[in-house]
Amino acid sequence: MWELEDKINELIQQFIEESDAVCVSADKVGLDYRCGSVYVSIDEDFIAVSHNTNSIEYYGGFEYIDSEYITRLGHMTFYSGETSRVQDCIEYYIENTENKNNNLEQEGEQT
């Protein structure tokens, strides 16, 4: 049974890597920092957490996401970007990443 669990977790890790998901502090996606770390994938349109979901559900409001938009596999829980709560977080991440990159480019031009 352990071998099956290991194989599932390997496949999940491979999916995370192939989806270009990045692990960031929850505040980088507009959530309370107490939610901990989350994986955000723009390409695959999801936010995922490893292991315990209590913090993101309580502090992040994810307890209100309908179960049809939640997938639990191995040690990961995936929240679909088809819900407004998740989509708002992904958009927040995109906007703030673009702003940060623009600021870095402008600083480079000034020096």
Image: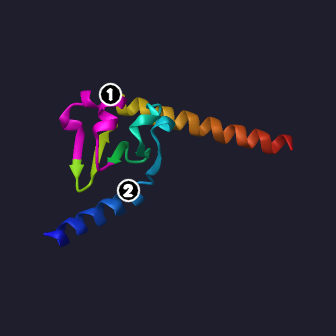
Is 15 placed left or right of 64 in the picture? right
Specify the quadrant of the image occupied by residue 52.
Answer: top left
Query: Residue at image x 47%, y 51%?
Result: 22
Question: At which x and y percent is residue 41?
Answer: 42, 47
Report which residue position mark 1 lands on: 61
Label 2 crowd (10 A; few <14 / some 14-19 / many >=20): some
Q: Which residue is mark 2?
A: 16
**62 part of magenta stretch:** yes
Q: Position of residue 55 (x, y in %)?
A: 33, 37
Secondary element type, mark 2: helix
Residues shaded magenta:
50-71
In the orientation shown, which residue stands out farthest toward the front? Answer: 34
List x then y, in percent, for residue 97: 58, 40
The reply to whether residue 98 is in sight is yes
Is 38 positioned to the left or the right of 62 in the image? right
Q: Where does the image place residue 2, in percent across and percent down from the top left?
A: 17, 70
**Rendered image quadrant of residue 15:** bottom left
Tags 1 and 2 touching, CB below 8 Å:
no
Q: CA distance from mark 1 to mark 2?
A: 23 Å
Q: Is residue 65 magenta?
A: yes
Q: Amino acid at mark 2?
A: Ile
Label 1 residue SS = loop
Instruction: Give the left or right position of residue 52, taking residue 21 as reference.
Output: left
**Pointer 1 or 2: first along the chain:** 2
Query: Split into 4 quadrants, where in the image is the C terminus?
Result: top right
